[in-house]
Amino acid sequence: MAANHDNITFSVRDLAIGYSLKKEKALIASNINFDTIKGELTAIIGINGIGKSTLLRTLGKVQPKLSGVVELNGKSLDNYKPIELAADLSLVLTEPIASKNMTVAELLALGRSPYTNWLGALSKEDVLKVEDAIQQMELAKIQHKKCYELSDGQLQRVMIARALVQDTAVILLDEPTTHLDLYHKVQILKLLKSIAHRTNKTIVFTTHEIEIAIQICDKILVLDGTVNAFDKPNKLIEQKAFDTLFPSDTVFFDAQNGSFKIKE
């Protein structure tokens, strides 16, 4: 069933991603086509080096596309000014934060900068957004700690909370579960799905956790450099889209239980 146009956030057509090096273009992936929908959690999966982070950075306008069309809420991403984009889209990348000398609460407050006045003073609504994110991400016990005192996993949760504080219709996250154990990986992704469904946000993330993504996500983009299939997980299993990810003589995808098995 075709999505209602009012529900589409990202519309991506014939997108090619990569890097421009002087006069030459280094292509990483092309033929990328998908629509993201309000209220859905979407994963971008694929092997290392296939372009997952590059795609996310392109969607976040951190780096330019090589060719194709990317629209956000019906408007070309090229035409967004930075302050406009910050009110519509929040981006959580894997790069270290600029100042780890801030407390968790201070860092979260920065998420309100697209909405505060020129003094950066927080309104009552801004304070409530910060408090709500602290509760959702279970950060109450560490909110007054300096960021340099946090473990990688705690910092990861803080950066997700900051995106929630920014309160945009679209949230993009690069490998949000990297430094977490299995329990916390599942907990974070279930929380992101709950937030997407409850608040009607579009949440898109890159991940290596393919089996968890299959069980939790509404949609998945299988970035394989050729077909780049995009659909609901059960439809992708039917299409054998996951079979293309790894050499079949080493690992195979077991469609019955949605997991990868090692060939003996």
Image (cartoon, rainbow, N blue to C red):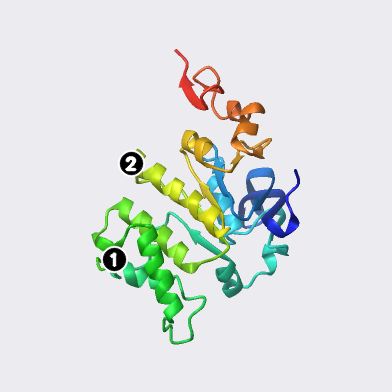
Q: Is residue 94 visible?
A: yes
Amino acid marked by disc 2: Asp
22, above or below 124, in the image:
above
251, above or below 2, in the image:
above
Residue 237 on image: x %, y %: 61, 29
Give the distance between the C-alpha atoms of the residues marked 1 and 2, in whole angstroms: 21 Å
Q: Residue at x 31, y 55 (%)?
A: 154
Residue 20, quarter of picture:
bottom right
- Which of the two labelled residues, at mark 1 and mark 2, occupies the earlier sequence position? 1
Residue 132 on image: x %, y %: 40, 66
Check disc 1 and report the residue beneath it.
143
Q: Nearer the viewer, residue 207 or 15?
A: 207
Residue 102, quarter of picture:
bottom left
Q: Residue at x 64, y 51 (%)?
A: 36
The tag on residue 181 is 2
Amino acid marked by disc 1: Gln
How crowded pointer 2 is (Cα within 10 Å; few <14, some 14-19, many 20+) is rated as few
Determine the secondary structure under disc 1.
loop
The tag on residue 44 is none
Residue 253 on image: x %, y %: 54, 23
Quadrant occupied by the N terminus: top right
Quadrant occupied by the C terminus: top left
Q: Residue furthest top?
A: 264
